[in-house]
Every structure is written in C-alpha cells, then in structure tokens.
Amino acid sequence: MPYIVDFENVSTIGLESSPVADALAGLRANEARYYKNKYDHVFTVSPASEAPEVLGWLNRILADERGIVISARPLEVTSFEVDGFRMAYVFYESGLSVNVMYGIKDGEKRAVGFKLSEGMGVPEELASRFKFARQKSKLAGVIRGSFFVIKGEY
C-alpha cells in the first residue's frame, strides 16, 4: 500500500525492521521535503514487493554500470517523473538509500546516488569503490553520500 512521506511528522512506517529505522525515516523525510519544496511533488513510497519493476530497473543499472549488487533487503521504492527526469529510489533495511536520476532526453544528466543513514556503516559492496561526503540535515542528522554518472542507456 502506498505511503505519502510526511516530512513534518517523521514516521518509521514501513522501515521498522531497520536497525537504524529512525535515521532512515529522517533520510526518507529529507528527500520528501526536497521534492515538495523544489518541484511541489508529493513523495510517495510503496513496499519493494509491490513495485518489482522499480527495483529491477535500479538493480540493472547498478549491475551493468559498476557490477554492484546491494546485499541489504529492499524495504521501499518509489518512481516518478519530475522536471524532465525519471527518478527512482530504493530504501534498504541497512539504512542505505539508492536513487537514480535519469534525464529523459538524450544528453541530460544521468546518475546514481547513494546515501547512508546516520549510524550505519558503509556497505561492503560500496566501501572500496566510493568516498562519501557528509552533509547535515535537520531531519536525518548526518547523511553521507556519493554518486556516479550513468554512461549507458536504460
């Protein structure tokens, strides 16, 4: 069942099994606030089992571009189009959030972003490949993030 993420009253709904559920809920709320403020988009997530095509698309990009397979269990996903970009997010039980920003027109920006919830370690499959920069968020505490540019067509 879809869930509209409330960034004013942060909730762990759908994320309860995560050992860093509160921080992951803050990270999810941080993303919801960004899209509401910048694009007036309501950030709505669904259980990963209800939208396997979103998870499959993201997994294919990770595997094809960098040979990455995320070992954590996916909890929630969302996919939407905004301002000429197809966006997809997966929130994992470990506290990891992976997003794809895919420019619909040829030549537009295309990238994969990783964000780590406060309190989680860097996943083994990412540790040797990426450096993570820190940013502070009122909703999520300290978020560590990294990204790579997508070269292929998806």
Image (tube, rainbow, N blue to C red):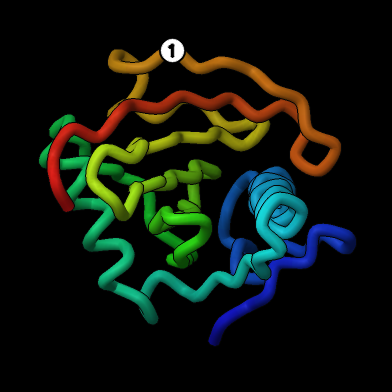
Q: Residue at x 65, y 49 (%)?
A: 31
Q: Is residue 129 above or below residue 58?
A: above
Residue at screen point 65% across, 65% down: 41
Tell which of 25 and 5 is nearer to you: 5
- Residue at image position (21%, 35%) is 68
Check disc 1: other Cα within 10 Å, few if <14, some if 14-19, many if 20+: few
Quarter where residue 147 is shown: top left
Q: Quadrant of residue 13?
A: bottom right
Residue 32 position (above or below residue 147): below
Locate residue 24, reporting x and y percent.
64, 48
| Amino acid type, mark 1 | Lys
Q: Residue furthest bottom?
A: 1
Quick one: SS at disc 1? Answer: loop
**Can the viewer see residue 112 in this picture?**
yes
Name the residue tied to disc 1: 131
The correct choice, above or below, for 48 with respect to 94 in the image is below
Residue in the image at 72% along x and 47% along y: 30
